Amino acid sequence: MTSTKNDVLDSVPSGATERLLIPDTWACSGFAERRFVGFTSLVSLDLAGVPKDPGVYVVLRQAASSPRFLEARMKNHPDAAAPYSVADLAKHWVPGSQLVYVGKGDDLRYRLRLYIRYGQARVANHDGGRSIWQLADSAALIVAWRTISDLPQIRDAQDAEKHLLRPFMNDHGRKLPFANRRL
């Protein structure tokens, strides 16, 4: 018997507030319905519009086709972790999913700044989600975010991230989003 999104939700204590976080579809439209905002290019994001509050962010790929993987990122910081192999990237790809990464931050603006700077090879300290920078179309990725202040049953940003990752795994054969490597 396979688990469903509702099985996961029903196993989590609380009421309907978490359901405000989990989309019906793992695409831009599903996240917009769950009050995520932004939906702008990750690489040209104006950080002034991102709140300094705790929350979660998602990175989405709009293309439905399978991506082309790069042997290495376009830029690489000398202290950054080694790039993943193309075989490893292909193994972690989730066919049909537009969601490629779920991230969290106690300060969304600061966390997204680090993530973008990592992609520009300006910092070496954001390994979470680093495989998105090995997508040939990484410049076309979209980012959206949601603060958690109106979700009293969600304890913190890490809790919110897990509330997104677990149902995603149930919907995708126990696989995490492409660039998430651990729950």
Image: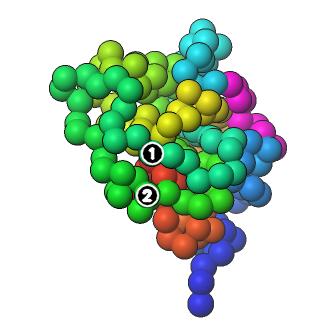
Q: Residue at x 47, y 32 (%)?
A: 105
- In this rendering, would 99 be left or right of 33? left
Q: Which residues are magenta?
A: 31-40
Distance from the alpha carbon under mark 1 to that under mark 2: 8 Å
- Contact, mark 1 vs mark 2 (Cβ under 8 Å): yes
Is 4 rendered above or below residue 125?
Answer: below
Is 136 rendered above or below residue 9?
Answer: above
Q: Residue at x 77, y 48 (%)?
A: 30
Q: Is 32 a magenta residue?
A: yes
* Residue toward you, 150 or 112: 112
Name the spot of residue 115 as percent of width and height, x first: 43, 27
* Residue toward you, 85 or 5: 85
* Residue toward you, 137 or 4: 137
Q: Residue at x 68, y 44 (%)?
A: 63
Q: Which mark is residue 90?
A: 2
The quadrant of the rendering that contains the C terminus is bottom left
Name the spot of residue 31 as percent of width and height, x first: 73, 43
Looking at the rendering, which quadrant does residue 116 occupy? top left
Amino acid type assigned to the residue bearing label 1 in the image = Phe
Q: Which mark is residue 69?
A: 1
Q: Residue at x 53, y 33 (%)?
A: 138
